[in-house]
Image: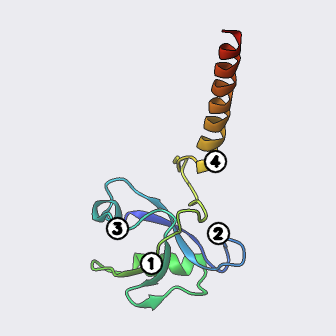
Amino acid sequence: GLGFNIVGGTDQQYISNDNSIYVSRIKKDGAAYLDGRLREGDKILAVNGRDLKDLRHKDAVELFRNAGCDVSLKIQRRPQNGPVGHQGDGESGGLPLAAILVPGLALAAAAAWILLRYRQRM
């Protein structure tokens, strides 16, 4: 195989009102992983010049299965603040930035408050 999973299609929209096909998972040591250019969350626009617009999910899967040995993908990179890729098979997709920043800011505020209270006592 090509070493990645996809989501989306006209019958299984990954993003509301969007029929596009997206990379959901890159398999470790698979062809896509070893190549290093494809990323989870990338939108795949075409395979070997064939447009993926308005395809059902199973039809997109068939295109990938029959793509041959030399595969050319036209992709659109997901913006850094775009949708987080679907994580199937129990894979971890990392944490959203807010999950790190909010507790970090709360901890910094608590430390500043403790420091100010300590200085007032001196």
Instruction: Calculate the distance from the C-alpha at mark 2 to the C-alpha at mark 3.
Output: 22 Å
**Mark closest to the chain's N terminus, 4 or 2:** 2
Q: Nearer the viewer, residue 103 or 10?
A: 103
Residue at image location 40% in from the left, 56% down from the top: 27
Numbered disc 2: secondary structure: loop
Is 15 displayed left or right of 67 in the figure? right
Structural distance between the alpha carbons of marks 4 and 2? 22 Å
Of helix, strand and loop, which one carries label 1? strand
Cβ atoms under marks 1 and 3 closer than 8 Å: no
Is 29 or 109 nearer to us in this picture? 109
Mark 4 Cα shell of 10 Å, populated few (<14), some (14-19), many (≥20): few
- Badge 4 is on which residue? 98
Residue behind mark 2: 14
Amino acid residing under circle 3: Arg
Pair 2/3: label in front: 3
What percent of the width, then of the height, locates residue 41?
52, 65
Residue 70 lies in quadrant: bottom left
Q: Nearer the viewer, residue 60 or 40?
A: 40
- The location of residue 91, given as percent across then percent down, is 51, 48
> What residue sits right under mark 1 in the picture?
75
Q: Is residue 4 above or below residue 56?
A: above
Position of 38 compared to 59: left or right?
left
Q: Are marks 2 and 3 in contact (CB under 8 Å)?
A: no
